[in-house]
Amino acid sequence: GKTIVVTGVSSGIGAETARFLRHHGASVIGVDRQDASISLDGFVKADLSEQAAIDAAFAQLPEQFDALCNIAGVPGTAPVDLVARVNYLGLRHLCQRALERLPHGDQGGAIVNISSILGAEWPARLDLHKALAETPSFEAGLAFLARHPVPQETCYQYFKEALIVWTIAQSQKWFLAHGVRMNCVAPGPVFTPILGDFVQMLGQERVQKDAHRMKRPALADEVAPVVAFLCADESRWVSGINLPVDGGLASTYL
Ligand code: NAI
């Protein structure tokens, strides 16, 4: 079986992904700032909002692993600096650190980043997102954001958009050069502890509108198998996509 590192493993989508992967024979090493309540093959406690903490976590992770699932994230009710760090800068640093530990070549390793259907409007700010994507490090990203501040109200959407743009751009380079695939999965609303935060972020009206447009929020175990597929050899020719898992919600905005 494969060895797969899963962040955000202590709750919601991360926990279900770990459970699904283990059920199908993978060894899962979890990473989270909170202790995990599910069985895992290894666990590293780390605060993924700090570059130094991510580097310290890598000292405890296996020398080689097959895939990385970046599922840890905070809602837009968190301070904008934290949203930037966890949902984008830290995630990106995790990918960069993982690159050297993933298999390269024909059957290269895989990275899956959790975006959101709330990141769908990335083309509207493409130039900014591309410029941020070109910052080479966590620190350089922070400096860019100090020059181009992001408002609290839309920071969640902004950094999901930025994540999609970075993933698409970076995946092209890494797939060509190393055979490492990187993709995003974009969930619509999912029943997890942060679902209530979206009501606060988007307002009751938008949430009610969405509720009429979809059957129900997803269960975390309806997202997990899609993440697992993008880690598996069966998806080896899929690279640089942002795959919605939203019960068709985004399509109703057409
Ligand atoms: P959750 O709150 O159930 O799980 C998030 C996990 O990330 C928690 O275990 C938390 O401890 C961990 N985490 C947060 N900040 C961390 C940090 N600084 N260091 C280490 N670990 C940290 O949330 P859920 O819903 O499972 O979210 C997972 C991902 O899915 C997030 O990226 C979220 O933005 C995304 N998402 C969720 C949707 C939803 O409706 N629940 C919809 C679309 C995307």
Image (cartoon, rainbow, N blue to C red):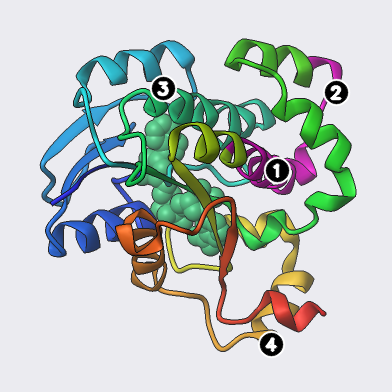
Residue 41 falls in which quadrant of the image?
top left
Q: Under tag 1, what secondary structure?
A: helix
* Position of residue 90 measured from the top left corner of the image (x, y, whole percent): 51, 26
Name the foreground residue: 206 vs 173: 173
In what quadrant of the picture does the C terminus appear? bottom right
Q: Earlier in the sequence, mark 4 or mark 3?
A: 3
Q: Is residue 162 magenta?
A: yes
Q: Which of marks 4 and 1 is in front?
A: 1
User: Magenta part of the protein: which range?
Assistant: 146-170
**Taking the image as drawn, is residue 205 in sight?**
yes
Residue type pointed to by label 3? Arg
Residue type pointed to by label 4? His
| Rendered image: mark on residue 212 | 4
* Position of residue 116 measured from the top left corner of the image (x, y, whole percent): 61, 57
Q: Under tag 3, what secondary structure?
A: helix
Q: Nearer the viewer, mark 4 or mark 2?
A: 2
| Rendered image: mark on residue 165 | 1
Q: Under tag 2, what secondary structure?
A: loop
Q: Which of marks 4 and 1 is nearer the N terminus?
A: 1
